[in-house]
Image (cartoon, rainbow, N blue to C red):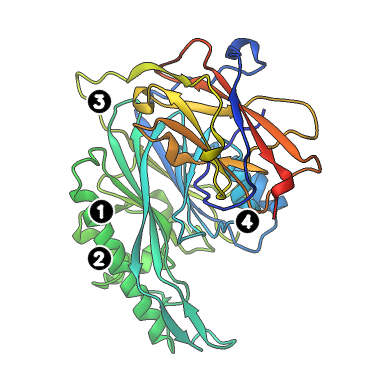
Amino acid sequence: MRILTTRLLVPAVLATSALATVAVPAATAGHASPPARSTTPHMRVGTYNFEAFKPMKAFVPAMKKFKKQVDVAGLQEMGMTSRAKWLLKDHSWGYYRPPALQQNPIIWRRSAFDFVNAKGIKIADARSLGTEHGAGSEFKKNSYATVVHLRDVSSGQQISFINVHLVHGAIKRSSAYPGRPKTFHLYLDQVAGLMGAVEAEKADTANSGGVYVTGDFNISFRPDAKTHHSRLPFASMRRDSMHSMWQHSWVLSRNRGTRGTALYDQVWSAGRPSSTRILRRIHGSDHFPAVAKYALPSAAADYVPAGGITGFVQQPVEGAEFYKQAFMKFPITGTFDVGWVQVQQVSEEGSDVAQLGTDFVIEDSSLQPGSSYIEVRALADGNLHETPLEHFTLQLVPYGGAAIASGETTVEGFIDASNKK
C-alpha cells in the first residue's frame, strides 16, 4: 500500500477517465486498520533544518526518526525535490508549503489534527544584497512564512502554526554582521513581518488553541535574550507575550545547541512547554532537531467529534472534468464536514499501476471541510511507465464518527501516459 498527501500544484499528464468500483471493505482489502485518533492532553511541536545539500540516504533515516518524536513540525531547507516527494508519500502525515515558498513546509500527524486551511504570508520584500556574501551579486526573492491552521481532534480547538527560516549571515552574536548592512536590514524586516503575522493570527478568534511559531532564526537564543535588542526575535516576541522554548530550559546550563553550541532553532508560543529536547541522536544535517511538549487546550464541555456518512459517487467522471491541467475530480456524497477521512491507494500488481507520490498526488485542499469531491493531479515529472494507459484505485478509510456509505468505498482512475509532454 502506498499513501500520500500534497499541496503540489504541477501541470502534467492528462487523465482521461475514472469510474467507481464495487466497494472493498477495509477489513478484507488487505489494509491494516488505521490508528485510533489521539486523545493525549499534550502535543509535541518540532523544528528541523535539514541542510539542503545532504543526500537522500542521510535525509530518509533522520526524518523517519524525527517523525516519531513529533506531532507537528516546521521544516527548513526542504525544496520541491525528492525530499518533498518522499514526505508526500506518507498520507498519515499532512504536508503544506505555499506555492511561492518551496523550502519551509509544515507537517502534521493526521491522527492528531484535522487540516482546516493554510497560506503563505509575505514577511519581507525582495531585494539585492550586492556582494555582501562574496561570489558575485546576490538577489533575495520575497520572504514568506508558512501558516497552517489545524484542528486538534481531541478538543476541537483550532491551532495556528507558523514556520520561518530567517536569512543567514545577518547576525554576529546579537549585532549586525560586519560588512553586511543590507543583509542585516533584510533580517530586521523579516522579524517585523513575522511579528505582523503573529499578531494577526493571535487576533483571529478562530485560533482558540493558540499560535505556535517554529523555525531557524539564525540567531542564537542565549546572546539574543541577554542583549535584548529591540528589533531582534527575543524582544520582539516578548512584546507580544510569546515565549521561547529555551526560556528556563535545562539546555541553557549546558554547552549544547541545535547547531554547534548555538540555539538557532526554536518554537515560540504564548505558553511555556512542559519539556524541551535537542534530538542529538538524529544525525545527517548540520542542525539537530528541537522538540517542545505543550499542554493542549481543553475541549468544551459540549464538544462531540463530528460524525456522518460520505463516499464516492457511483458514476463515471466526465472527461470534461480533466481539461489540459492534468487533474481529475472524484465526486463524493456527503461532505468532509463529517470528519476527516483518509484517502489511500489500494495495493495492485503490475507495471501499469500508477503510483501515489510518483505519478500523481492527491490535492489536499480538496479534503477541506465542505468539499464535494477529491481532486487528483498528475506530476509533470512523474515516472510514468511505458504502458499508454495506467490506472490506480483510491479507497476511503474513516476516522472518528465518520462512516463510508455502502458500496462507495473505492473509485478507480486512469492516467493516459501517451499524452505525456
- Mark 3 sits on what residue? 299
Left/right of residue 299 with respect to residue 218 in the rendered view: left
Mark 4 → mark 3, Cα distance in angstroms: 39 Å
The residue singled out by tag 4 in the image is 81
Three-letter code, disc 3 = Ala
| Residue at the spot of label 2 | 235
Disc 2 and disc 3 in contact, CB within 8 angstroms? no
Check disc 1 and give the amino acid type.
Met
Give the residue type at disc 2: Ala
The Cα–Cα distance between marks 3 and 1, rounded to whole angstroms, is 23 Å
CB-based contact (under 8 Å), mark 4 and mark 3 = no
Is any atom of residue 283 visible in this view? no
Q: Are marks 3 and 1 in contact (CB under 8 Å)?
A: no
| Residue underneath mark 1 | 242
Q: Position of residue 185 (x, y in %)?
A: 34, 80
Query: Which one is nearer the viewer's eye here, 415 or 25?
Result: 415
Residue 288 position within the rendered picture, expressed as x and y whole percent measured from the top left:
54, 54
Between label 4 and label 2, give the one nearer the viewer.
4
Q: CA distance from mark 4 to mark 2?
A: 36 Å
Residue 319 in sight: yes
Residue 100 percent coordinates (x, y) = 45, 61
